Every structure is written in C-alpha cells, then in structure tokens.
Image (spheres, helix red, strand yellow):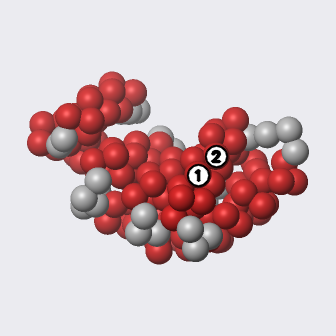
Amino acid sequence: MRTPRRFAELIQCLWSDDPIVRMRAADASEKVSGRKPELLKPYKAELLGLLAEAKQIEMRWHLAQMIPRLHLTQSENQRVIETLQIYLEDESSIVRTFALQALADLSQNDAGLRSRVRGLLEGSAVAGTAAMKARARKLLKGLKS
C-alpha cells in the first residue's frame, strides 16, 4: 500500500452495511497487512471485537489470517483462541481451515497451546474436509516440537 494513511479508510469498510464492501475490504486488509503487519496495530481492539462478532464467512477467514499478526496480551490471546475454536465449528471449510492456520501460528510461541493445536491438527488431518486435511498435514510438519 503506497499510502498507509488510507489503510484507516480500508479498515472502516470492514463495518460497512454492504456485505460486498466488507468482503473486499477484508481481502484487501489481509493482503496489505501480510506485507505490512504494523498497519494493524492501531486497530487491534476493533479487530479483536470484530473477530468475535463477525458472521460473514469472508470476514471470518480474513480476520483469522490477520489476527495472528498482532502483538496480543495473554488475555487477548486467550480470547482469540476461544473465538478461533468456535470458528472450527463454522459451516465453511475455508473458515475452519484458516482457524487451524491461525491457531498454529499463535502456538509457535506458546508451548501449552502447541500441544492442544497438535491434537486439533492430527484430528483434522484424518477427519477434516480435503482442504483441512491438506493444511493440517502441512502445519504438522512445520509445528515446533
């Protein structure tokens, strides 16, 4: 993003009344924050709230990708983990797959969470959708011991 100050406008669109605008804003925010995760920092509280409230599939999967890029406190991290575990029950395979990815990302610096995530990944590698099985196998290979 050439003009990071415009990122605020993009983030605002995540609360648009129009689901297409929300979806496109979530996609663009995720892509930009993948290259410049520091842009998310001023919106941490709002994004954490949105993670818990979002019902739209596209919002959920993009938020699951963005949230692990934030520096979270222990209590924020716990709330995120609880929400992502709810996402694992979502009707959308993509939401469930990105929830697994987010939990694996968050577990990289948390040995206690890592053992729980390993169990989730092992279960998903056997009983998940095709996308979940493939992602779980890949994540298991990269998961720290």
* Residue at point 41%, 69% (across, down): 55
Which amino acid does the dot numbered 1 rest on? Answer: Arg
Q: CA distance from mark 1 to mark 2?
A: 6 Å
Which amino acid does the dot numbered 2 rest on? Answer: Ala
* Residue at point 69%, 42% (across, down): 32
Q: Nearer the viewer, residue 136 or 114?
A: 136
Residue tagged by mark 2?
Answer: 28
Residue 145: quarter of image: top left
> Secondary structure under badge 1?
helix
Q: Is residue 5 above or below residue 75?
A: above
Q: Quadrant of the N terminus?
A: top right
Q: Is residue 55 above or below residue 131?
A: below
Q: Position of residue 13 (x, y in %)?
A: 67, 64
Residue 118: quarter of image: top left
* Residue at point 40%, 32% (across, down): 144
Q: Position of residue 31 (x, y in %)?
A: 63, 40
Any mark on residue 24, and which? 1
